[in-house]
């Protein structure tokens, strides 16, 4: 809500608006509307004079959307773009872009490879994500563990998938999310089959 309020009064309203559009695109991609997500992200990326951190956030969103469209070339292109923007910070970083790190780009890349049905390419990215996801942020950590469990299961390593699901089971009750609970149950059933 803070960001939405700032779009009307901030000198960087264009930048905040581009972030809102990119965030909406990310949600649209999760819902399976991949072409709509790509169109929204193209609009966000065309915002003039974006701070490098804001451009990196938009590129990070484009990584996952490209994976959902099954476009491996775009996954690589947007990964490179996000890392390039992160590698050239400027003094204009908005508060809403400070969360993005190389590890965040790795996580998006791993999820994109998983969405492209290329789990073996996802494993190194998602393994690093589990390593760096702080257990203090249980929701984020749980997402990381479930992403990796899904990936190694698709690679045929059900023993490792079961170990990861055991880790998830230890904290799933502390995270209030129907989507995570449903995903955990679906993965548990798939690995048990």
Image (cartoon, rainbow, N blue to C red):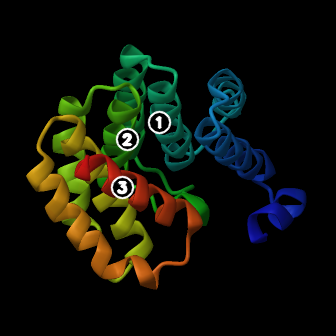
> Horizontally, is 126 left or right of 29 in the view?
left
| 125 up-or-down from 140: above or below | above
Q: Which mark is residue 111?
A: 2
Residues at badges 3 and 1 in contact (C-beta under 8 Å)?
no
Could you say whether the residue bearing mark 3 is in a helix, strand or loop?
loop
Mark in the foreground, 3 or 2 = 2
| 53 up-or-down from 117: above or below | below
Residue 46 in picture, x, y percent from top left = 68, 27
Residue 34 seen from this side? yes
- Gap between marks 3 and 1 measured at Cα: 15 Å
Residues at badges 3 and 2 in contact (C-beta under 8 Å)?
no
Which residue is at the front of the view, 31 or 136?
A: 31
Could you say whether the residue bearing mark 2 is in a helix, strand or loop?
helix
Residue 134 in picture, x, y percent from top left = 29, 75
Task: Return the residue at label 1.
Answer: 64
Q: Residue at x 63, y 30 (%)?
A: 45
Residues at badges 2 and 1 in contact (C-beta under 8 Å)?
yes
Q: Quadrant of residue 165?
A: bottom left
Which residue is at the front of the view, 9 or 128?
A: 128
Residue 12 in picture, x, y percent from top left = 75, 53
First-in-chain label (2 vs 1): 1
Task: Return the residue at label 3.
Answer: 101
First-in-chain label (3 vs 1): 1
Mark in the foreground, 3 or 1 = 1
Q: Residue at x 88, y 62 (%)?
A: 9
């Amino acid at each position: 809500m803070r960001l939405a309020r700032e779009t009307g009064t901030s000198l960087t309203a264009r930048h905040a608006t581009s972030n809102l559009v990119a965030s909406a695109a990310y949600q649209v991609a999760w819902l399976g509307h991949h072409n709509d997500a790509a169109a929204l992200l193209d609009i966000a990326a065309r915002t003039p004079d974006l701070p490098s951190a804001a451009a990196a956030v938009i590129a990070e969103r484009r990584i996952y959307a490209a994976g959902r469209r099954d476009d491996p070339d775009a996954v690589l292109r947007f990964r490179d773009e996000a890392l390039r923007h992160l590698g050239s910070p400027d003094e204009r970083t908005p508060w809403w872009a400070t969360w993005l790190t190389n590890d965040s780009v790795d996580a998006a890349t791993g999820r994109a490879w998983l969405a492209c049905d290329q789990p073996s390419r996802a494993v190194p990215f998602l393994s690093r994500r589990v390593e760096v996801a702080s257990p203090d942020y249980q929701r984020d950590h749980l997402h990381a563990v479930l992403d990796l469990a899904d990936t190694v299961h698709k690679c045929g390593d059900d023993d490792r998938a079961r170990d990861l699901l055991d880790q998830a089971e230890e904290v799933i009750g502390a995270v209030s999310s129907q989507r995570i609970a449903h995903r955990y149950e679906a993965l548990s059933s798939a690995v048990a089959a």
